[in-house]
Image (cartoon, grey):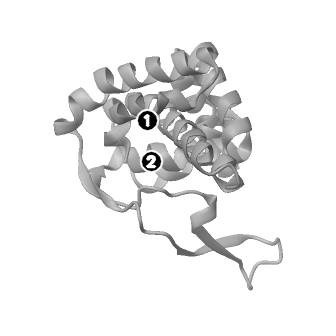
Amino acid sequence: MLESIPQLREFLYALQDHERKAIVEEIIDAFENNVLNKIDKLEKQIIHGDYNEQNIIVEQSKSSASGEYKVKGIIDFGDTNKSPVIFEIGIALTYMILQAKSLESGGYFLAGYTDIRPISNDERLLLKYCVAARLAQSLVMGAYTHNLDPSNEYVLVTQEEGWKIIEELWRNRFIEIDEIWQTTADKYLTQSVK
């Protein structure tokens, strides 16, 4: 749950790299100040809480000659909870960025999502904090769990790419990421109309 981001402080000792630890501390502080302080004003509902590529079942469309896929089902409801809707969007956005290995790809995700359900400007501005927080959460808890059980390689799935993305987002592109996502979304929408 993204609401538990402040509790990550208890697990920071699992990170050996001091620079990475500093990034996570900054993200926790920023998430508390910019998102959790506004949580009472955010729309809430029951969310999946871990919407990622490993929890989505797809099948190839039988009627499609182009090899299109459609979502057939969703699994793993262990993280389901009542939280702000923007948390669900941020969590899914995080994993789509990780899969694509590109921050810009977030714009494609947002274009698709907002085509079905609009996001307010206020909520959109919180997304980059949600993405950074979910990355931090996944990376810290992965390191912590791996320290407890070094044979559990599954918990390290996002480590390599996750650290690249979080460093790029937090250190290099945080200020401009809203514009990058919007530009990518606009480009996608323009191409899909043609």
122 versus 159 height, above or below: above
**Dividing the picture into quarters, in which one does residue 57 lie?**
bottom right
Disc 1 crowd rating (10 Å Cα; few below 14, some 14-19, many 20+) is many
Report the residue at 51% width, 27% height from top: 13
Q: CA distance from mark 2 to mark 1?
A: 9 Å
Q: Relative to the observer, which residue lies in front, 169 or 15?
A: 15
Report the residue at 56% width, 20% height from top: 170
49 versus 38 height, above or below: below
| Residue at which label 2 appears | 89
| Residue at which label 1 appears | 130
Report the residue at 51% width, 25% height from top: 178
95 versus 180 height, above or below: below
Q: Relative to the observer, which residue lies in front, 74 or 62?
A: 74
Q: Nearer the viewer, mark 2 or mark 1?
A: 1
Residue 4 is situated, as x and y percent measured from the top left of the image, at 33, 40
| Mark 2 / mark 1, whichever is N-terminal | 2
Kind of residue sitting beneath label 2? Ile
Would you say the residues marked 2 and 1 are in contact, meaning their CB atoms lie under 8 Å apart?
Answer: yes
**Can you see residue 118?**
no
Residue 48 is situated, as x and y percent measured from the top left of the image, at 41, 61
